[in-house]
Image (tube, helix red, strand yellow):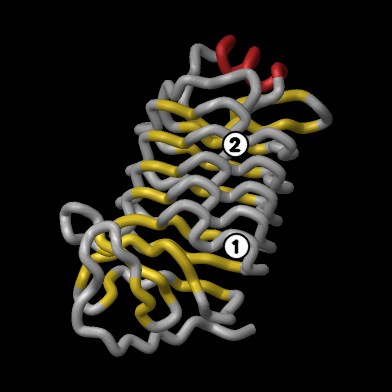
């Protein structure tokens, strides 16, 4: 598998709202002067996003920036605070690394991939509608700082192991009723919940 090689030839980024191509990426700047990746022109299927481009921190991944590119793995650096709607949707992702520093995962950001496990960094506070919809996820780890998990984040998954650290607001659309009922019966206790032979237990 080919790994991303970053060839950067520009010394400045675009003004806010104006995109330009830098190496394999299409990049613009937000109002704070940080880089926002809005597109990808490379051919690598194992994607490692740089924490900075031309010395400018990459703070966000824009809407549909990496959608439908047949990516098989992706690593998002800790400089990225926000991943936009549909950013990595409709790929072949089976490996995903999200680092501390990320706060928001957008609508359907990783929908329709091949992820079997997801680890949500402790810095994440919001996971929006359908973020991991249509993945064969069996195990997920949710930090104790997540304040909002919108509906259908994990719909059409096959969760059998859920590690949860706090009292995140749960929607019935995200988890099967058996887990929700058991989780509530355990007074939303932090820990790892495992389903064995159809029965949920707190490990």
Q: Position of residue 38 (x, y in %)?
A: 42, 62
Q: Label 2, on which residue?
A: 130
Q: Are marks 2 and 1 in contact (CB under 8 Å)?
A: no
Q: Label 1, on which residue?
A: 95
First of labels 2, 1 by sequence position: 1
For the point 59% across and 36% down, the residue is 130
Q: Which quadrant does the C terminus fall into?
A: top right
- The answer to which quarter of the image holds residue 72 is bottom right
Q: Position of residue 137 (x, y in %)?
A: 68, 46
Residue that extends furthest to the left in the rendered view of this protein:
32
Q: Position of residue 186 (x, y in %)?
A: 55, 14
What is the spatial separation of the Cα atoms under label 2 and label 1, in whole angstroms? 18 Å
- The answer to which quarter of the image holds residue 202 is top right
Which callout, 2 or 1, points to the residue nearer the camera? Answer: 2
Query: How many residues crowd around disc 1 within 10 Å: few (fewer than 14), some, or many (20 or more)?
Result: some
Q: Is residue 14 left or right of residue 6?
A: left
Relative depth, front residue between 193 and 168: 168
Query: How many residues crowd around disc 2 within 10 Å: few (fewer than 14), some, or many (20 or more)?
Result: many
Q: Position of residue 80 (x, y in %)?
A: 33, 56
Vertical order, 65 against 45 (above or below): above
């Amino acid at each position: 598998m080919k790994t991303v090689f970053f060839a950067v030839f520009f010394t400045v980024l675009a003004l806010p709202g104006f995109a330009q191509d830098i190496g394999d990426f299409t990049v613009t700047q937000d109002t704070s002067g940080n880089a926002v990746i809005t597109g990808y022109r490379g051919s690598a299927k194992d994607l490692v996003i740089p924490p900075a481009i031309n010395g400018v921190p990459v703070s966000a991944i824009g809407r549909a920036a990496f959608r439908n590119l047949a990516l098989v793995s992706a690593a998002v650096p800790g400089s990225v605070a926000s991943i936009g709607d549909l950013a990595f949707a409709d790929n072949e992702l089976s490996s995903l690394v999200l680092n501390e520093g990320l706060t928001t995962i957008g609508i359907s950001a990783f929908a329709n991939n091949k992820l079997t496990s997801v680890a949500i960094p402790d810095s994440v506070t919001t996971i929006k509608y359908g973020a991991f919809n249509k993945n064969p996820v069996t195990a997920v780890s949710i930090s104790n700082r997540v304040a909002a998990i919108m509906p259908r984040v994990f719909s059409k998954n096959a969760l059998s192991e859920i590690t949860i650290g706090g009292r995140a607001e749960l929607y019935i659309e995200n988890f099967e009723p058996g887990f929700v009922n058991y989780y509530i019966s355990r007074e939303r206790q932090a820990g790892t919940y495992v389903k064995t032979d159809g029965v949920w237990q707190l490990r």
